[in-house]
Image: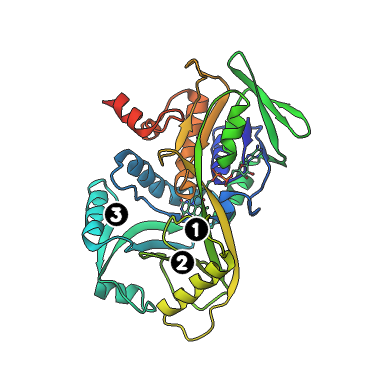
Amino acid sequence: MIIIGAGIVGASFAYHAYKNGVDKITVLSSHLPGDMNQATSNTWGWVNGYASNDKSYANFRLANLNYWPKLINYISNFNYTSKGAFIWDQGEKELQKTIKQHQSWGQSVKISTKSELKKYLPNLNNIPTMAGFGVDDLAIDGVRATKELFKASGSKILKTNVKEIICDSNNVSGVKTDDEIINDNEVILTAGLGAPKLLSTINIPFEMHSSLGLLVYTKPLPQLLKYPITGFDFHARQDDKGRLIIGGKFDDDSSQEENIKGAAKKLIQDMATRLNYNGNMILDHFTLGKRPLPVDGRPKIGRLVNKKGEKLNGIYLAVMHSGITNAPLAGKFGIDEVLSGKRNNLIRNFSPQKTDTQEEFLNV
Ligand SMILES: Cc1cc2nc3c(=O)[nH]c(=O)nc-3n(C[C@H](O)[C@H](O)[C@H](O)COP(=O)(O)OP(=O)(O)OC[C@H]3O[C@@H](n4cnc5c(N)ncnc54)[C@H](O)[C@@H]3O)c2cc1C
């Protein structure tokens, strides 16, 4: 099996392929975990179940939330850095509605009162009147998780650019890299934002969007935040090295920002006013990551068809935003489908070449 792309999604496919007895897995990737050119290296790492007004996507996210701890148990040398997360990035009424909706879908979320927030976030200066609390939310170091999954999979990983997918009469038979041709009758495409270009080499139009996410890292600090927090115009969490990882408004696009360094410094200055800490908060570094965004916001996972609607054999696509949340079951169910042909119900609505409205329409 060939896997194109060594981010968290490729790692999950490699791990689950190995668990299902695939013994020869070759991963081809122009960038490796830790290289700044992949989304996984620039992630905030919040695993959560929120997907307001989209039950099938929320179901999938929730299933991932439940599966992550099991996956962590299977792989050695890895753990989450925190459990539970607070959100107050909406007005009170809207927030209550969001929490109620997700509770009714089975997610373990609740409203925390001001006095509870004072207890759980003792170093926060301006305590909001209420916040949502995702009990099972996790914070994950994306690069470490990816490396450990690859390690556990025993894959052969080659740092190389794939130029072309080789396909003849609707059968994919391998890939052409910058250096060589590699033949295999199963190619898994987990190339994030590189997927559209690779699919164009086999005449499959596939559109993705992208936005730029800025995150700043401080030098290590004493414990100030036990839980990740997401307010109206900021999000922050503290990692296991004591560094605060701070962003602006959640999912903000920084691509129009003219002075990125200035914006990075401001994120830290603003956070310093929010937290009760008398020492200096010093900028360690900042990251700028491109989010891989499928056009309707939902993951795209599955087999492909050509322009005539004929099925292509030997290729399987998995691209998504919120890949840190979604990768575990994208990989598990994806590999199940590749090996058995059976498609899990939880990914039923995420076919790569259909949008959400088409999917819901087909399911009526
Ligand atoms: C700022 C930011 C914050 C985020 N926060 C969160 C969060 O809190 N929670 C969450 O769940 N998600 C979050 N995400 C999203 C998440 O990080 C991504 O969805 C996830 O990392 C995507 O993983 P991937 O493996 O699909 O893609 P990537 O990590 O981008 O990996 C794709 C790989 O494919 C390789 N590739 C591409 N084209 C080719 C080619 N032609 N040949 C060879 N290799 C190729 C690339 O080199 C790359 O290594 C965030 C993303 C960003 C940018």
Q: From the top left corner, tell me how far across and down residue 224 is, in percent.
A: 45, 76
Mark 1, ligand 1, within 8 Å: the answer is yes
Q: Distance between the residues labelled 2 and 3?
A: 20 Å
**Closer to the camera in the image, 362 or 106:** 362
**Residue displayed at 55% across by 46% down:** 8
Q: How far apart are marks 1 and 2 (CA)?
A: 9 Å
Q: From the top left corner, tell me how far across and down residue 182 is, in percent.
A: 72, 28
Q: Is mark 1 on a helix, strand or loop?
A: loop
Q: Do the residues labelled 1 and 2 touch (CB within 8 Å)?
A: yes
* Mark 3, other Cα within 10 Å: few <14 / some 14–19 / many ≥20: some
Question: Which quadrant holds the N terminus?
Answer: top right
Vertical order, 314 against 253 (above or below): above
Amino acid under disc 2:
Arg
Labelled disc at residue 157: none
Q: Residue under circle 2?
A: 237
Question: Which quadrant holds the C terminus?
Answer: top left
Vertical order, 345 against 265 (above or below): above
Q: From the top left corner, tell me how far across and down residue 201 is, in percent.
A: 63, 26
Q: Residue under circle 3?
A: 108
Name which of mark 2 and mark 3 comes first in the sequence.
3
Answer with left or right where residue 110 lies relative to residue 175. left
Q: Residue under circle 1?
A: 44
Answer with left or right where residue 50 lies relative to residue 325. left
Can residue 184 be seen from the camera position used here? no
Vertical order, 124 against 326 (above or below): below
| Disc 2 versus disc 3: nearer the observer | 2
Amino acid under disc 3:
Ser
